[in-house]
Image: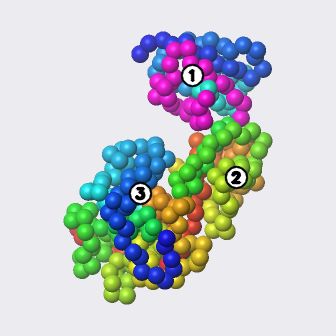
Amino acid sequence: MNAIEILIDIPGAQEPKAITAESDAVVIEVLKKVAPGPVEEFYLIIEGDDKALGNEERLHQRGVRHRHRLHCRHGLHVEFIDSASSDAVHFHVEWHQTLQQALTEAYSRLKEAPKPDDELVCEKNKKVSLMPYLNKTFHELRKEHICPDHKYLIRRGSGGA
Amino acid sequence: MAKAKQQPVLSSPLLAKEAFERDLEKVLKRRGNSLSDLRWERLGDLCLFVPVIGRVPGSETVDQYLVKLEFGYYPEWPPSTIFVNPNTRSYDLAKDKCWLPSVVDCTEFRVHDNYQQVGQVVCSSVTLEFYKVLHDVKPEHVWNPEKQNFGHTIYQVEWALNSSFHKGRQSALAA
């Protein structure tokens, strides 16, 4: 692996910051170099991309190359998947927003209306319903380690039995 | 388009294959994996085997099941969905009950080993067999190919087998 230079826009800074990193560097290591506050409150996203870089991903895995431009943002990037269609939406939310606010935004972006038997679950751990947590902020959810990768599944019900 | 209380109608093989391949790409993309990473196996144009792990809450036991999806009526109707013996990749009522999960008191999903003497039925509005037996279904649950694909079927199976309704296998595995 070789060293690459990447340009990162940082909140509050006029100019992007040039960072040199190995192309297989882990994203969190890059984030630690540029986050202007607690690193867990920021994320990186490639300019023009709609999906944030995962903290454990490596730069080359997401196609980050020499002189690519990234943005460091305060808040978090969430993903909601509709289990019926497998459609997904990704967007930015602030830590003080609630899961319900994000879910409402997700339905709007999916151009879908909520149904009474819909259930929100963590995509990686579908056993745990997130319905009791809808009024919690993302800040509170982070403290409670609820769905830490911010990838949610809107589980659509079915008839049966 | 699927309708309640109406026998499903076969799709043209070409249409079914096109729809299956289109949706397979979408479902794999969403799961961020390839067929081999997921250990899903495609057999021919219109058949997919999907391993699903079931867990009983409060138990360390992990039950491994194999689901066979067939797409002959797709996309207007959901895929045929049955649990099979992973060794034979088929279902023999006399011998294979141990390869079926027991899902109890769930209003969305149940697995009948021999529903009304017609064979195995995964009783959920995201499976073809549910319509073939002319099961009652609410209008909002009728399969809608414009808003649903077979990914929904797999999500429902995974959910049911990891929910508090899953009680393990319908009978013990032979030693």
Q: Give amino acid for label 3.
A: Ala
Q: Compared with residue A51, is residue B80 higher up or lower down, i.e. above or below?
A: below
Q: Compared with residue A69, is residue A124 higher up or lower down, i.e. above or below?
A: below
Q: Can residue B159 be spotted in the picture?
A: no
Q: Chain of mark 3?
A: B
Find disc 2 in the rendering and name its residue.
Answer: A108
Same subunit under labels 2 and 3?
Answer: no
Find disc 1 in the rendering and name its residue.
Answer: A29
Comparing labels 2 and 3, the label whose residue is closer to the camera: 3
Q: Give amino acid for label 2.
A: Ser
Residue contact at pointers 2 and 3, CB within 8 angstroms? no
- What whole-number distance in Å separates the C-alpha atoms at marks 1 and 3? 43 Å
Q: Which residues are magenta?
A: A48-75
Main secondary-structure element of the magenta-colored stretch: loop
Q: Is residue A62 magenta?
A: yes
- What whole-number distance in Å separates the C-alpha atoms at marks 2 and 3? 26 Å
Q: Chain of mark 1?
A: A
